[in-house]
Amino acid sequence: SVLFSIDQLSHRYADDTIALKSLSLTIKQGKKIALLGNNGAGKSTLFLHLNGILQPTSGKIYFKGKEVAYNRKALLSLRRQVGIVFQDPDSQLFSASVIQDISFGPKNLGLSNEKVLERVEWAMEQTETAVLKDKPTHFLSLGQKKRVAIAGVLAMDPEVIILDEPTAGLDAYYSKQIMNVLNIIQKQQKTIILSTHDVNLAYEWADEVVVMHDGEVLCHSDPVTVFQQE
Ligand code: ADP
Ligand code: ADP
């Protein structure tokens, strides 16, 4: 079934940069989707629209058939279902310890302490971060920070997980570790959307590849079809 339907979405930033140009895209439930495109193609801007951080300059976004609305209540509900892992983990890790950081989201959902702990332990297990739980986040390596940021989003148990360049800056070993985490998450029937510059990763991992350039979608298909065209 269709999860996101994006209809002629345009975004113009305050300095008049046009980051998205009448972009239309359909995202189906349960798929692994890779967004490819050079720096400035509009990938991050698109992601910020998918959980309502940015509002369209024009065009519409539908989530599960309902038009995304920008009031507090609607946004809270959207953000519970659509989790984002930002490219720079320092922008989302701010607690004194790893376990506090991972607990922050589920605590905010108003779950019982028992339920929060259950979610957090599960998320730490999926991301192999349990051994780090008492460490202050600012002492972690980039690869560890990225896994903790993913754990924090997982602990919210969203239906959709968006990751902005999850393997950027990581060597092959740590990239593989992140991809293993994503493969485990995929088994929970979640929809995963990530951006990457890594063509091999997109080819091997994704069910669907979306190539963006200059605020537009150049092509959207299965990896074999997309890479045959290049
Ligand atoms: P990437 O292409 O690796 O995703 P960018 O260099 O495009 O990263 O952007 C990094 C950060 O800087 C993002 O948060 C983006 O929103 C912001 N940014 C990019 N370009 C501008 C700009 N012209 N003015 C202000 N902020 C920008
Ligand atoms: P990508 O993630 O594909 O690198 P972005 O969505 O970060 O692309 O950027 C798309 C365009 O929007 C770029 O020209 C970038 O410089 C610009 N941009 C991104 N964030 C901002 C911002 N906060 N203010 C102004 N321009 C921005």
Image (cartoon, helix red, strand yellow):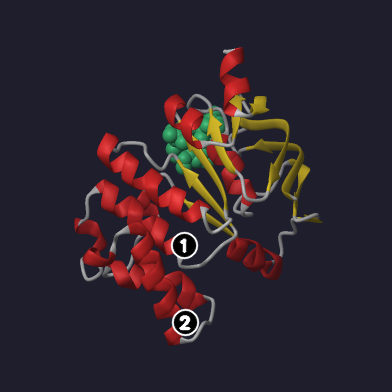
Query: Viewer-proximal residue, 127 or 46?
Result: 127
| Residue that carries the numbered disc 2 in the rendered image | 115
Q: How far apart are marks 2 and 1 (CA)?
A: 14 Å
- Residue 214: give x, y in percent of width and height: 60, 23
Query: Mark 2: few, some, or many residues within 10 Å (few <14, many ≥20)?
Result: few
When the figure is inspected, residue 145 is found, relative to residue 45, above or below; the finding is below
Mark 2 or mark 1, which has the lower sequence index?
2
Position of residue 39 in the picture relative to residue 93 (left or right) = right
- Residue 169: give x, y in percent of width and height: 31, 36
When the figure is inspected, residue 87 is found, relative to residue 20, above or below; the finding is below
Quadrant position of residue 222:
top right
Query: Viewer-proximal residue, 2 or 134?
Result: 2
Does residue 90 appear in this view?
Answer: no
Q: Say which element carries label 1.
A: helix
What residue type is disc 1 on? Answer: Leu
What residue type is disc 2 on? Answer: Lys
- Residue 61: give x, y in percent of width and height: 74, 47
- Residue 78: give x, y in percent of width and height: 65, 62
- Residue drawn at (68%, 43%) of the image: 27
- Residue drawn at (42%, 78%) of the image: 118
